[in-house]
Image (cartoon, helix red, strand yellow):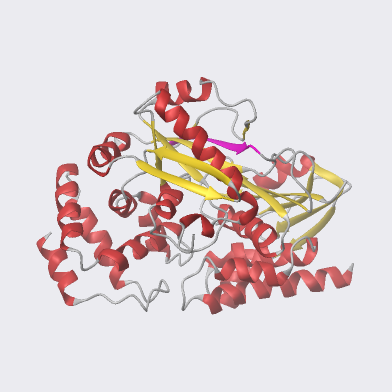
Amino acid sequence: MKNEWFLWVDEKRRRNLFRILEELSVLHRRRVDQFILIGALSLLIRGILRYVVQWDMDLLFRNEDALNGFVAAEKSQELRIVHYDEQLMRGESIASLHTAWSFDRTWFNVDYILKPGMFEFYSSSLAEVGTYDQKVDYENVSYHFSLPVACPWDIFIEKLLSARLRRDLEAGECMSVDIRHVMRLFELEKSNEQFWGFIGSRTERLGKKGMLKDNLLELLLSRSKLGYTSVEVPDHVYRRLRDL
Amino acid sequence: MGLRYEVRLSGAGGQGLILAGKVIAEAAAIYDNKTATQSQSYGPEARGGASRSEVIISDDVIDYPKAERLDFLLALTQEACDKYCKDLKDDGILLVDSQFATDIPEGKFRVYRVPITETAKKELGKALVANLVALGVFTALSSVVSPRAVEAAILSRVPKGTEDLNLNAFRKGLELGSSLKRDD
């Protein structure tokens, strides 16, 4: 259990999270292709992030019908769900419904999200990466998850292309969660040729290769100002970016 | 029944209120060993419009995670102040940014006016850390989370090399809040 991802989840909320992941696994089995776990928690589960915060869960849906179907779907009787929003909140490029889920009187935020085109983007990689399967034995109880958990490299791309990261970059926001995630992934993968190949082909298909290059370059050049002085950027990365 | 303390941080998008709410919740739940929930109620990418983050802190279980009667309201804009003052308890605390919320609705709550954004700009050189100044004032006035826990929560969220700026902003707020409390 030494290096398990859930050790970075507050102990008090761990069992609740396990049960929620099991519940989602059941819902996923019943209605395949319905949602994908994205965001910080997916990076934690995939072993990328290693720190303790109050984790939230982001579920990305294919479309509004899928989201509404999920809301209406029958769930475990022991599960309590409280909606923070009265209705789907629509922003410029995102719509979301914030909820909290509880099996044991601790609460876990579960946000239902719609982003045009993003479900298809994430699901195309999932076809290769596959469903995330894990059996966890914790305090004499076994939990089994089988869930569509986003490919971290796709998260790297999505975050680098997001308007939110752009704004954080311009403002010099050193507490930016998106910048933190991108820098972490960069540190892990910067010398991985496969990673750069993946980034190049994916952004090419999106027609946003130039934008990703510009944003990543700016981020790397601003890293000292943002508090990431310790992140080394080898010359080959700049070459790789130029040739991307 | 144990403590149940309800906090709402309100203002405009881009003011770092969601992050401040998360820091309070993490300080309480992870470092002060209490129970906490934190919620936000707008699209995650919204900026410029209204923004609201709520935190509930308890020393027991939290039966219901939504705020109903506020113990503490931070209003960084006049609009937020006008809209949410009615949700405060009679003995609740209203903290406003004195530069942006000048017209305080009548009520039986206690009011503290602090130049939050101006302090961030003038004394710390960065308006962006106004949320951390506000967090410091909140910590001093509410006494619901310990300064040590809030500092630990801030440190867990900032990259190395920016600790000083962020902790200084928090400590400046703490100082302002403590002096207001002494004057009571």
Stretch of the chain drawn in magenta:
A95-103
**Percent from the top left, x then y, of residue A72?**
52, 20
Q: Quadrant of residue A128 in the image?
A: top left
**Percent from the top left, x then y, of residue B160?**
47, 76
Which residue is at 9% across, 62% downward? A243
Q: Is residue A6 above or below residue A58?
A: below
Task: For the C terminus of chain B, give its image quadrant.
Answer: bottom right
- The secondary structure that dominates the magenta segment is strand
**A152 displayed left or right of B65:** left
Q: Is residue B112 above or below residue B48?
A: below
In this rendered view, identify the residue nearer to me: A240 or A87: A240
Q: Quadrant of residue B24 in the image?
A: bottom right
Q: Tell me if I can see residue A188 in this picture.
A: yes
**Percent from the top left, x then y, of residue A31?**
40, 23
Q: Residue reaching furthest front?
A: A140
In this rendered view, identify the residue nearer to me: B155 or B97: B155
